[in-house]
Amino acid sequence: MAIVSRGFRGRRTEDPRLPPGQYLERGFPVLSAGPTPRADLDTWTFSIRGADGERGSWTWRELQALPADDIVRDIHCVTRWTKLDSHWRGVSLDRLLDAVRIEPDEQYVLAHCDGGYTTNVPLADLRGGQAWIAYGYDGGALPPEHGGPARLLIPHLYFWKSAKWIRSLQLLDHDVAGFWERLGYHEYGDPWKEQRYWGD
Amino acid sequence: MGRLTVADGAVEEPAEDEPSLHELLPDGADDPVAPRVLPWLPATLVERRPETASAATLVLDAPGWTGALAGQHVDVRLTADDGYAAERSYSLASPAGAPVELTVQVVDDGEVSPYLTLDMEPGDHLELRGPIGRWFVWRPGSTRPVQLIAGGSGLVPLMSMVRTREAVGASTPFRLLVSARTPADALYDEELAALTDVEVTRVWTRRAPEGWTGPVGRADAATLAAACFPPADEPDVFVCGPTPFVEAVANALVDLGHMPGRIRTERFGPTGS
Ligand SMILES: Cc1cc2nc3c(=O)[nH]c(=O)nc-3n(C[C@H](O)[C@H](O)[C@H](O)COP(=O)(O)OP(=O)(O)OC[C@H]3O[C@@H](n4cnc5c(N)ncnc54)[C@H](O)[C@@H]3O)c2cc1C
């Protein structure tokens, strides 16, 4: 029997698009471990690397010149808010990953960001039209506090996996825990399975 | 970006002067710590202590609670009699290792905070899960000066750090800058006034108390420069509050020369956009 909080009614915005334990948020909260880093677009690059070094690299202009997708997705933050139908623009990771050599045993990825933040994702979760390097939000440039100039966008996982201020992806033959993943947060982070913390 | 210190050394990056977030991870954070499942704990309200007209401290009895580090938070779950449930995060106000005390500020039209702050009575129940968060924490073993900067209810986890310092009798230099709208919104006022060796700087954004001679308005670079340990002291800086407050303060601190990697932030609530 659940523990009942006497007299609690709640707002009851139950929605089939809300994963368990989430609430509907109209604003856009921010979760970051530190200050918002500043990027210089003239020297900015996004790269994909393996154990033997760089496999591919794009300048800001080169990234902008690639065909981009307009993306509408629900996003789910581990701090419990869900934002429905958020609008993004960015380059599909299918396109970027197809442009580089990937060894068969490289099934894990560690994303690196300005400021030193990292997060780990299985390679499979970056493929199949599920993930992007996003640089546009809601019709404009992606604001710095939300990860601009560019962030990973992996809407099917809790939003900390959509690393802000992305600079490179490192291909690995084994899983290496990222920043929050070493501080108690779940290694995979499926919101529909409520994989918030270690052991969930 | 600095070099990443993962256990197997698999990740190499060009080193720079500044420590990366990973190098600043606390001791033990690199250990493949045995994942411990955090259970939901039933908790009973022991006491509800009003702090202001719109904020209260909840003292909770949660059998099975094993204590927390200063700065950590819990997830709280409220369940209605028909099974509908809502969950939110709240920082611990109590010192490290102590029983659970939360301080909750009413958010107008909020689903959870008005119930916790105004409706809940001693003997009523909720569930909680934690402690959560191993980054925005202060450990008494550290001797580096600590600069705390709070906006509104962002004072709660910083108060846990101040109380932890007092509780263990640490002599770590602490400074606290607290921004509140008006004196009627100020949390823990008497306790802060009674602190003897923590330097407390007040910022009033809308209205100051009688006799206040300083400026009224948001904390700006000049206020931060005057109130905070200088960058040369290499303080650990903890900034907590509403998102726009934290953005403005953290940006100003970087401009003042503080190392981004030493500024830890926790943001409550949405951005304007
Ligand atoms: C790690 C963490 C620690 C936290 N610690 C504390 C704490 O110690 N004390 C505390 O009082 N709160 C704390 N919060 C905020 C808390 O989790 C809730 O967001 C807050 O109580 C509002 O919940 P609600 O259900 O009342 O409002 P909701 O129903 O969630 O929100 C109602 C409306 O208010 C807006 N809103 C939500 N939060 C805020 C806010 N903080 N300021 C302005 N507008 C807001 C929402 O966008 C929404 O439009 C913490 C949040 C996090 C992520």
Image (tube, rainbow, N blue to C red):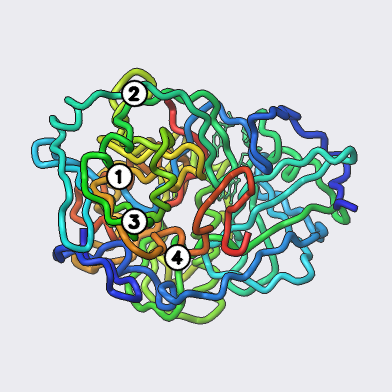
* Along the line of sight, the residue nearer the viewer: A154 or B76: A154
Looking at the rendered image, the disc whose residue lies closer to the viewer, 2 or 1, is 2
What numbered label is drawn on residue A110? Answer: 3
- Taking the image as shown, residue A128 lies to the left or right of residue A35, namely right
Give the labeled residue for mark 2. A69
Residue under the image location 53 percent in, 72 percent down = B164
Farthest residue to the left: give it: A42
Locate the C terminus of chain A and report the quarter of the image it occupies. Answer: bottom right
Residue type, numbered disc 4: Arg
Chain ID for label 1?
Answer: A
- Nearest to the eye among marks 4 and 2: give it: 2
Chain under numbered label 2: A
Which residue has dot 4 on it? A182
- Mark 2–mark 1 CB contact (< 8 Å): no
The image shows residue B69, relative to residue B49, as above or below, that is below
Report crowding for label 4: few under 14, some 14 to 19, many 20 or more residues within 10 A (C-alpha).
many
Task: Report which quarter residue A117 is drawn in.
Answer: bottom left
User: Percent x, y for residue B134?
Assistant: 49, 65
User: Disc 2 to disc 1, how far (Cα)?
Assistant: 26 Å
Circle 1 sits in a helix, a strand or a loop, which is it? loop
Q: In the rendered structure, the residue with mark 3 lies on which chain?
A: A
Q: Where is mark 1, residue-wise?
A: A36
Residue located 39% across and 68% down the image = B174
